[in-house]
Image: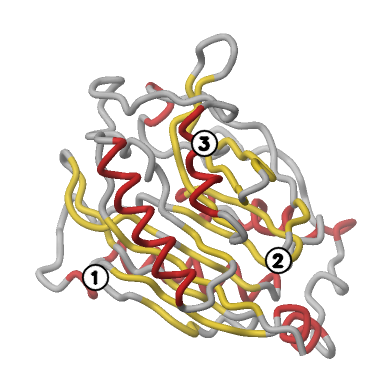
Amino acid sequence: MATLRMAAVAAPFGRDLEENFSRISTLVSDARASGVRLLALPEACLGGYLANLNGPEDLPPALRPDGPEIRRLAALAGEMVVVAGYCERDDAGARYNSAVCVTGDGVLANYRKVHQPLREDLSYRAGDGFAAFDSPVGRLGMQICYDKAFPEAARALALDGAEIVVSVSAWPLSATNAHPDPAQDRWMRRFDLFDRARALENQIVWLASNQMGTFGSLRFAASAKVVDPGGEVLATTGFAAGTAVAELDVAAVVESARRVMGFLRDLRPDTYAAAAPSPAAA
């Protein structure tokens, strides 16, 4: 039985890249010491998320996927597989809310966030697809934050062979009707529900990181976690900074979950309407 020890981080990250790298270095070092081979850092951990969603003000530093910052991240990763969020700049100068997967050998994959909440599109362009990829710890897929609200996104990765999906987030608590107990906050409950549902309906392992603390007008929900293919939370930070760690035989638990009730096997795509929503629904 080949087990994989994996971890998801809840921690604060702002604009100061040196401070970010100092925190990442500590997180990677601690994870390595505990035998972690796959580590999920939050969305926008290199340079911070948007201070608000009202427009392109106080933007994070825009980094190249082949630039020195990503090479520095890869060097920190070493033999581990590390997923981290950042603001990507392409050759034309356009910005994307992106996630990168690295090892000490370099970049394994780069993903640009497809689904944009509220007015995030004022600051970033949207990505255009989902693709799984092979890594030293198995076949992975990546998502960013709001993507988890769309079942089709996780399903596309599962159908492409991903057995682990890494979902990195800067998911906030509710800005209206906030609950005095963060654990009862409606947006935190939705965050947790999406994580469990996406794992269960695709019978995959779900690794979810998140920002923690306050940045600009946003207060983040933390709740980093590892979810098994049955939708059960194996480890979580709850509403606190920390690292959720779990160890499991990924191939075995996925095969076991799909042995009798195989949701991907039993799909009936010929029966599913693919029409765009009506104007009223939109």
Would you say the residues marked 2 and 1 are in contact, meaning their CB atoms lie under 8 Å apart? no
Q: Residue at x 50, y 75 (%)?
A: 226
Q: Which mark is residue 240?
A: 1
N-terminal-most mark, 3 or 2: 3
Q: Which residue is mark 2?
A: 137
Q: How is the image coloured?
A: secondary structure
Amino acid type of disc 2?
A: Val
How packed is label 3: few (under 14 Cα within 10 Å), some, or many (20 or more)?
A: many
In terms of sequence position, does the residue under pointer 2 or pointer 1 come before the other?
2
Q: What residue is shown with label 3?
A: 70
State the residue in front, 209 or 20.
20
Q: Which mark is residue 126?
A: none
Where disc 3 sits, the SS reads helix
Q: Is residue 282 visible to the viewer in this orientation of the structure?
A: no
Query: Residue at 83% of width from left, 90% of height from top?
Result: 260
* Residue 271 image offset from top left, x and y in percent: 85, 59
Query: Looking at this view, is 30 or 165 the one in front?
Result: 30
Question: Does dot 2 land on a helix, a strand or a loop?
Answer: loop
The mark that comes first in sequence, 3 or 1, is 3
Front tag of 2 and 1: 2
- Dot 1, how many residues are within 10 Å of its Cα: few (below 14), some (14-19), or many (20+)? some
Q: Residues within 10 Å of mark 2 (few under 14, many from 20)?
A: some
Q: Position of residue 227 (x, y in %)?
A: 54, 77
Judged left or right of residue 194, residue 119 is: left
The spot of residue 52 in percent (x, y) is 23, 34
- Badge 1 amino acid: Ala
> SS class of the residue under badge 1?
loop
| Quarter of the image where one finds residue 185 | bottom left
- Can I make out residue 208 in this image? yes
* Tag nearer the camera, 3 or 1: 3
- Please name the residue shown 47% across and 54% down the image: 168
